[in-house]
Structure formats: structure tokens, C-alpha cells
Amino acid sequence: MYQFDTRINQAASLSEIMVSTENFPPEDSTSQLNPIDENTKRQKVTIPEGMSKNAWKKLQKQQRWDEQKDEFRLRRREKKRASRQKKAEQKSQGVISEGNNYHQDAKKVLPTSQIPSGIAVVMDCEFDDLMSEKEIVSLSNQITRCYSAKRHSQHEVDLVISSFNKRLRQRFEKSIQDYSKWKGIQFKENNSLAELLPEDETELAKYVYLTADTDEELVDLKEGHTYIIGGIVDKNRHKRLCLDKAKELGLKVGRLPIGKYIQMNSRHVLATSHVYEIMCMWFESNHDWEAAFNSVLPPRKLRKEVATGRCHPCEAREASPNRESGEALESGEQ
């Protein structure tokens, strides 16, 4: 009986609400809509003829970045300055230890003079058409790091940038304009690597193309030889690219002894800048590959034996479909 009365009361309350609602005067339907300013209406974007929508979006994004990059860099410098100040305060208070990690190593001082290494390195950048804009930027950054390694090395390792043209050169002209003042590095605007190779077979035999797709490991870097690094960032899309090119040009091939010192989940490949740095450090470390790898690569890439100073020769692990890093010895970040 109590439940029945409750239902009647609920129904009566609902009827009162409905009646009271009907007594309100109807609102003008147009009053519920916010007035629209004609100037705030979304204007249809006209994409230039011959350009895809995706390319147009990328262009607009690049233009926005060009307008804001100075402000962004200023904020980044201020953030780094604040971070350094905070760490200094924490060290003074004993919150963190004084020990340096890989990212806190002291900056090297430029040597007053360099010892001739007897070798030369050519970065083959004839793969412009195979890379995206982002990969071109990555390659240009790696060339910059190579130049930095060259300047800080106690040994003079000659560096030639081959096929410096198309988008790669445009990138330097736009964003790294001081490259023309770099000392001890040659930028060749040739169209192909073949233009730089000697015709004499005896001299050609002293050219070695470095590629991760060969089993021929280098024991040492021979005086009078020229070593070629593939300047391409392709995230492993183009297999055997540099190996096939070397065979076509009649060049010897080789690779650094990566398997002994590096632990990766796939092909044993490195960034172009890492390859050049390791070659420089091989001379710095009295021709010790282990020390060269250990001084250049982040600890996460090294085998545990190398990182702890107990490196033993061992066979590299089998490649797996998923790589830890998109970096390549034969090609920028293959």
C-alpha cells in the first residue's frame, strides 16, 4: 500500500512540472542561436595549382616554424639555463652526486694543431631523391656533428661531402649558412660519386665503401685509403643500397667491427655521424676499436661487456624485424 501511494505522488509531481512548463511563453527560435560574425566565418583555403593538400600543409607548418623559431630557441636557452642553475643548487645541497653521466661530459677543447691521419672520408650524398624533407634535415644535422668531431679530433681526418646539391644544399643555404666558413671540409657539387673516383685501378683499389650489408670487417684503417660513407637517412627502407652501388662502381666494401661492441635488435647499423666519430676516435685511442666505440656511442647501444670495460669478442645477435634505432652505418639513419 505504501509503494502504491508513493507512485501516485511521483506521478502527480511530474504532472505539475509539465503544466508549469507549458505556462512559459515560447521563445523565439532565433534567439537561441548566437549571431555569427561574417568576418569570423572559416574561409576556404585555396591550394596552389600543382600542389597536393598534404604538401600545402607541410609548407604552412614550415612557414609557421620560420616565424616562431627565434622565440622558441630563446625559450629553450632560458629553460636550459634554469635547469643548469637548479642542478648546481642541488649539487651544492648534496641532493645529487658530483658524478657525470654520458650527457654531462665536459666539452672538449679545440686542439691547436692536428696530426695527419693518412686517410680521407667521403660522405656520398647522392640519395637526395630517396629522402623526405625531415630526413634531409636529419642528414644535415649529422654532417654538422661530423664537422664538430673533425674540429675536436687530435688527428686530421679529411672529410669530403659529395653530391652536395638539390635539397641538401638548400637546407644548408637556409639554416646553416656559416657552413661556407668551415675549415678543412670540402663540399663538392658533383652529380655522382663516380666523378670523384680515380680512373687508375691501383688507386681505385684504395677506396672502400662502408656498408652494413657485408661480412668484410675492417681490422684497421689503412694509410692512403679513402673510406666512403653513404649519406642517406631512410629508416631502413632501402636494403643493400650502398652495397649494390659499390659493386656497380667496382669498389671494395667493408664495415666497422660493429658486432663485437654493439648490441642492437636488428642490422648492426650506425648513424653517419657516429661512423665518422668512431673513425676519428680510433686514431685518438691508439687504434683501439673498443675504446673508440665506448667513447662515441651512448651506453644503451653498447654491449654490457663494453660499457663495463669487460669487452670480449662475440658474435652479433641475429637481426629482428623491430629495430631499437633508425640509424645506419651505410646510410645516415637507415
Image: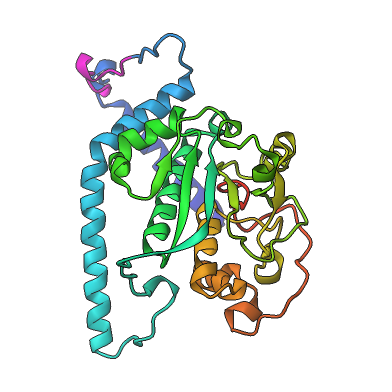
Residue sitting at x 26%, y 16%: 30
- The quadrant where residue 238 appears: top right
Residue sitting at x 61%, y 53%: 329
Instruction: Answer with left or right where residue 275 lies relative to residue 164.
Output: right
Reply above or below: 129 against 271: above
Please name whichever residue, 187 or 243, is drawn nearer the observer in this view of the structure: 187
Q: How far from the left and from the top, in percent, is residue 40?
A: 23, 20
User: Is-magenta flag for residue 41?
Assistant: yes
Residue 238 in sight in this render: no
Q: How far from the left and from the top, in percent, is residue 210?
A: 65, 50
Q: From this viewpoint, which residue is outermost toward the bottom? A: 94
Q: How many marks?
A: 0
Q: How far from the left and from the top, in percent, is residue 299?
A: 54, 72
Residue sitting at x 38%, y 26%: 59
Please name whichever residue, 96 or 37, is drawn nearer the observer in this view of the structure: 96
Q: From this viewpoint, which residue is outermost toward the top? A: 49
Reply above or below: 27 against 255: above
Residue sitting at x 21%, y 74%: 85
Reply above or below: 18 against 1: above
Reply above or below: 306 against 322: below
Q: Which residues are magenta?
A: 32-43
* Quarter of the image with the N terminus in it: bottom right
Instruction: Answer with left or right where residue 295 lies relative to residue 310.
Output: left
User: Is-magenta flag for residue 232?
Assistant: no
Instruction: Answer with left or right where residue 153 lies relative to residue 202.
Output: left
Secondary structure predominantly adopted by residues drawn in magenta: loop
Instruction: Answer with left or right where residue 162 lies relative to residue 198.
Output: left
Please name whichever residue, 286 or 65, is drawn nearer the observer in this view of the structure: 286
